[in-house]
């Protein structure tokens, strides 16, 4: 073959490798000894997970506990220092409503048992209602027997997962205080030699690691995503989520999660114990700043007003709703559900108020050759239905299953053909949830009367359809 022909072949090959599938093809064409540069002494890991938040840590645990990963090397890099967690008496102000599907994942490697040894509160029922009318919807299993969600503090979830690393020290290494500052992606062939087949991770102190598969779990500002040139669809909601820990005057059976839609954003109250609940109050940045500075008593008054006051009711929507409800009661009396009155709070925990800007972020791709994004690095949704971390844990379950299958078939962990199964499966789940949350946020973000009337009728009709509500409960819990 002449040099000309060789160059033609090579340039054709290079063109092919610049599309989305090439590296997996390359990885099947070269053995690791051919491809690693001889002067490169970085340690090689089968999987490096960048970001040890709730989702990244769960990913490391899920892989570390899988039989086929027994002899593999997994590295978890976390930017923040190691915390020696001791359950505090006071509840943390950051909590999540975990779904039964998340409970199943965490149970699989012992973290749920650990949560039970610390603390959590089951939710038997959710009640969501509109501040501009009397429309409401309740979601629960029949007779309120099964739990629809579990409220757990973020610190408790993370500590319970981290505790599981003791059992998998042989295949999982955790490095704290280790903020990856750069990633080098597989380079193309130069002078007929593959410069670097694996992804290289660089730490600020000059230490480097190579990996067959990099999993980006580094949150919504993901550096992995940025450096891999994965575009995002994103917008700022121009809303903040204000969190706090709330106190009741008297102990009560606290098993209902409440959410009231105000035109400024939803206010949600999640049960923590017989005497405490956790608040997520979505509102404009200016209002959030004002609420953060209010004296405690005034803040509690403002919150009780947000849950109870009738000022925003549209009289026409209320009347239209009553007529529709009478009709529903006549046609389908078994479909109606009872409305509970929301709680009233008497105090908040000192120093428990904090607020976070909210945005939507969605990565156009969740995978590239030798790369997968999980959790908020792949998708960040509005917290109004408490789905964010549950979607992240869903990514963990799906990616673990795909990678286990890949190894069982003797495949390459970074091969795009496997990773694409993960992407397709997760985007089918995440996109409808993300757009539903976004749509609800917009639908309830107005007090324009025709919209209020339409959503009142829609919510009441939905509340009367048991099969549709059962479907919502199933979707939210899986
Ligand atoms: C107000 C509010 C309420 C919410 N309520 C709920 C709820 O009820 N239910 C629910 O499911 N979700 C909820 N969410 C969403 C949930 O908190 C997030 O989806 C979840 O925290 C995302 O977890 P993550 O591990 O993907 O990302 P993160 O929690 O952002 O973790 C990323 C980790 O990566 C580390 N990191 C970053 N860069 C690097 C680097 N270069 N190298 C190494 N490490 C790095 C960080 O230190 C961090 O530990 C809520 C969110 C908000 C704002």
Image (cartoon, helix red, strand yellow):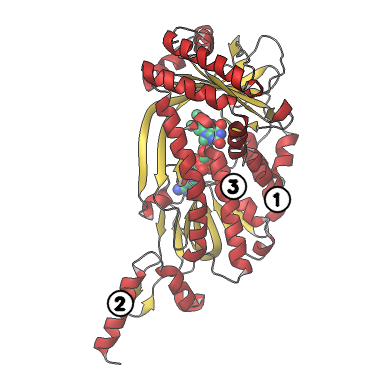
| Apparent side of residue 42 relative to residue 478 in the rendered image (left or right) | left
Rendered view: 50 above or below 328:
below
Residue found at the very far left of the displayed protein: 4
Q: Earlier in the sequence, mark 1 or mark 3?
A: 3
Residue 81 seen in render: no
| Residue 189: % across, % down | 35, 74
Please identify the quadrant where the N terminus is shown: bottom left
The residue that mark 2 highlights is: 12
Residue 435 in view of the camera: yes
Residue to which mark 1 is pinned? 166
Image quadrant where one finds the C terminus: top right
**Real-space Cα distance between discs 2 and 3?**
41 Å
Q: CA distance from mark 1 to mark 3?
A: 13 Å
Q: Secondary structure at mark 2?
A: helix
Dot 1: what SS? helix
From the viewer's perspective, is residue 77 above or below residue 47? above
| Image-quadrant location for residue 185 | bottom left
The residue that label 3 is drawn on is: 57
């Amino acid at each position: 073959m002449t040099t000309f022909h060789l160059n033609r072949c090579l340039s054709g090959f290079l063109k092919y490798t610049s599309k989305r599938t090439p590296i997996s093809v390359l990885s099947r064409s070269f053995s690791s000894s051919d491809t690693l540069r001889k002067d490169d002494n970085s340690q090689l890991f089968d999987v490096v997970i960048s970001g040890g938040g709730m989702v990244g840590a769960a990913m490391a645990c899920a892989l570390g506990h899988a039989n086929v990963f027994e002899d593999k090397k997994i590295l978890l890099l976390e930017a923040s220092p190691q915390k020696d967690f001791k359950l505090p008496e006071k509840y943390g102000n950051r909590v999540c409503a975990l779904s039964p599907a998340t409970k199943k994942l965490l149970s699989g490697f012992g973290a749920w048992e650990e949560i039970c040894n610390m603390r959590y509160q089951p939710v038997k029922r959710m009640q969501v209602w509109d501040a501009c009318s009397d429309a409401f919807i309740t979601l629960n299993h029949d007779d309120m027997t099964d739990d629809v969600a579990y409220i757990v503090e973020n610190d408790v979830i993370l500590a319970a997962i981290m505790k599981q690393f003791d059992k998998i020290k042989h295949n999982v290494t955790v490095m704290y205080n280790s903020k990856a500052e750069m990633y080098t992606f597989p380079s193309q062939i130069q002078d007929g030699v593959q410069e670097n087949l694996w992804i290289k991770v660089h730490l600020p102190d000059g230490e480097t690691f190579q990996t067959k598969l990099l999993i980006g779990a580094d949150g919504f500002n993901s550096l992995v995503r940025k450096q891999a040139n994965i575009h995002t669809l994103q917008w700022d909601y121009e809303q903040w989520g204000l969190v706090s820990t709330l106190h009741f005057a008297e102990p009560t059976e606290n098993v209902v999660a409440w959410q009231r839609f105000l035109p400024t954003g939803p206010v949600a109250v999640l049960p923590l114990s017989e005497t405490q609940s956790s608040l997520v109050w979505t509102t404009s940045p200016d209002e959030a700043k004002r609420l953060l500075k209010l004296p405690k008593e005034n803040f509690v008054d403002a919150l009780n007003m947000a849950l109870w006051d009738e000022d925003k009711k549209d009289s026409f929507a209320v009347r239209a709703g009553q007529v529709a409800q009478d009709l529903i009661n006549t046609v389908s009396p078994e479909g109606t559900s009872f409305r509970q009155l929301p709680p009233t709070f008497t105090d908040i925990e000192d120093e428990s108020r904090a607020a976070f800007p909210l945005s939507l972020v969605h990565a156009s791709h969740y995978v590239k050759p030798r790369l997968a994004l999980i959790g908020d690095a792949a998708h960040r949704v509005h917290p109004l239905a408490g789905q964010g971390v549950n979607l992240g844990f869903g990514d963990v379950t799906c990616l673990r299953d795909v990678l286990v299958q890949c190894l069982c078939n003797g495949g390459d962990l970074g091969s795009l053909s496997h990773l694409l199964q993960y992407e397709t499966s997760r985007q089918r789940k995440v996109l409808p949830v993300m757009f539903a949350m976004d749509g609800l946020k917009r639908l309830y973000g107005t007090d324009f009367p025709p919209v209020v009337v339409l959503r009142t009728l829609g919510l009441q009709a939905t509340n009367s359809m048991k099969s549709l509500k059962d479907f919502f409960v199933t979707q939210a819990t899986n």
